[in-house]
Amino acid sequence: MEVIWSKRAKQDYLNVLEYLHKNWGIKEVRGFVSKHNSLFYQVKYRKKQIILLTFLDNRQNPEKLNY
């Protein structure tokens, strides 16, 4: 399957990496996928695609999610 990043997913991902690097360091950047982050995606079986929609820090208010 092909993986496609939405514009929002790319920006959310880069924002998380930037925050971690700025405030914590490279070790945290390398291991940021954890119980504190959720990845929302959509599968299009006929097109054989997985579309990454957004990343969400689970400690944030879920109402921020607009999908």
Image (cartoon, rainbow, N blue to C red):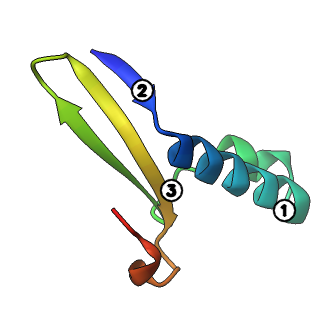
Is 51 left, or right, of 48 in this rendering?
Answer: right
Q: Quadrant of the C terminus?
A: bottom left
Name the residue that disc number 2 marks.
4
Q: Is residue 4 above or below residue 7?
A: above
Name the residue that disc number 1 marks.
24
Q: Is residue 43 above or below residue 35?
A: above
Is 31 left, or right, of 37 in this rendering?
Answer: right
Label 3 sits on what residue type? Ser
The answer to whether residue 42 is visible is yes
Q: Residue at x 41, y 70 (%)?
A: 65
Label 2 sits on what residue type? Ile
Label 3: how many Cα within 10 Å (few below 14, some 14–19, many 20+): few
Q: Residue at x 84, y 53 (%)?
A: 21
Which is in the foreground here, disc 2 or disc 1?
2
Name the residue that disc number 3 marks.
34
Residue 4 in the image, given as x and y percentages of width and height: 42, 26
In front here: 56 or 10? Answer: 10
- Mark 3 and mark 2 in contact (Cβ < 8 Å)? no
Q: Residue at x 71, y 55 (%)?
A: 15
Label 1: how many Cα within 10 Å (few below 14, some 14–19, many 20+): few
Q: Is residue 64 above or below residue 9?
A: below
Is 47 left, or right, of 22 in this rendering?
Answer: left
Chain-order first, disc 2 or disc 3:
2
Is 45 left, or right, of 42 in this rendering?
Answer: left
Q: CA distance from mark 2 to mark 3?
A: 21 Å
Label 1 sits on what residue type? Trp
